Amino acid sequence: MHGVSRQTLVVLVLGAVMAIGVPLFLWSRPAPVDAPVDVASTPAESVAPPATPEPVAPSPARRARPNPPVTTPVAAEPAPPVAPTTATLRISSDVPGAQVFVDRKFIGEAPVTAEGVAPGARQINVSAPGYDGVAETHTVEVGPNDIVISLKTLRLDQSIAVIHKHRFGACEGQLIATPEGLRYETANTKDVFSVALTALETFDVDFVSNNLKVKVRGGRSYDFADPNDTADPLYFFQQAVDKIRQQLMKGRR
């Protein structure tokens, strides 16, 4: 140390201080911030163009669907008519204004139409003042049915089992009455007869003897008894027949 001059010593100390201080100063300085690029001053060829986006394939749900084929509308065919299930009755009579009943239900005065009638056997009653009521059973079908009821026509269809009393003995048979006449049918052909109702001179019931007495005008007399020896069946038969007989005698046909 003694051989080193003071000037030399100062130089060495300064050199050591600088050797230590410069690195420390550099280490403590903040990092430099990049200066903004001036695009205007940058040559055009040095600016990179914007990136073009890659095409994205459409999803299956968004793919265009083909248009449906165009069809010409066809006019709808008219529905077939519904088949009827009930009957329609058109009821008339030879006596206008006669009252009409179907299955005991009043329908109206003839001529009259009854709709919505159930098909099958239906009872029709027609009546008018001065005429015998008519009750007929008609089998009606689905759809229209025309029925004509005559009140002016005489109706008679009566029959009764009887015993024909002879002077000696008797025979069994049947009395049958229609507007055409009275006839007696029996196995004994000698007693069989047929006579017009207007040709009967006597046609009465005797309740004392339980006997129906028949006498043909200008001909024979007949006595008929009921097989059960009662007058009631004979009386009902005689009343039904004599009613038509009286109308025929008045000229009604």
Image (cartoon, rainbow, N blue to C red):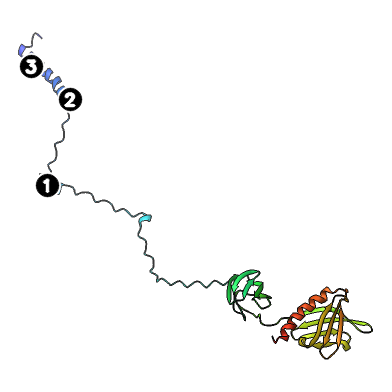
Q: CA distance from mark 2 to mark 3?
A: 25 Å
Q: CA distance from mark 1 to mark 2?
A: 36 Å
Looking at the rendered structure, the secondary structure element under dot 2 is helix
Looking at the rendered structure, the secondary structure element under dot 3 is helix
Quadrant location of the N terminus?
A: top left
Is 181 located above or below residue 24 in the figure?
Answer: below
Q: Residue 27: percent from the left, percent from the top?
A: 17, 25
Q: Which residue occupies the extreme bottom position in the image?
A: 218
Q: Residue 244: percent from the left, percent from the top?
A: 73, 82
Amino acid type of the residue tagged 2 in the rendering: Trp
Query: In the image, what residue occupies the spot 15% across and 20% down?
Result: 20
For the residues labelled 3 and 1, say whether their Cβ atoms are less than 8 Å apart: no
Q: Is residue 253 visible to the viewer in this orientation of the structure?
A: no
From the image, state whether disc 1 or disc 2 is nearer to you: 1
Residue under label 1, please give it: 43
Which mark, by number, is residue 133?
none
Amino acid type of the residue tagged 1 in the rendering: Pro
Q: Which one is nearer the viewer's eye here, 121 or 134?
A: 134
When asked about the image quadrant of residue 179, the answer is: bottom right
Residue under label 3, please give it: 11
For the residues labelled 1 and 2, say whether their Cβ atoms are less than 8 Å apart: no
Residue under label 2, please give it: 27
Q: Earlier in the sequence, mark 3 or mark 1?
A: 3
Q: Earlier in the sequence, mark 2 or mark 3?
A: 3
Looking at the rendered structure, the secondary structure element under dot 1 is loop
Q: Residues within 10 Å of mark 1 (few under 14, many from 20)?
A: few
Query: In the image, what residue occupies the spot 91% across and 82% down?
Result: 170
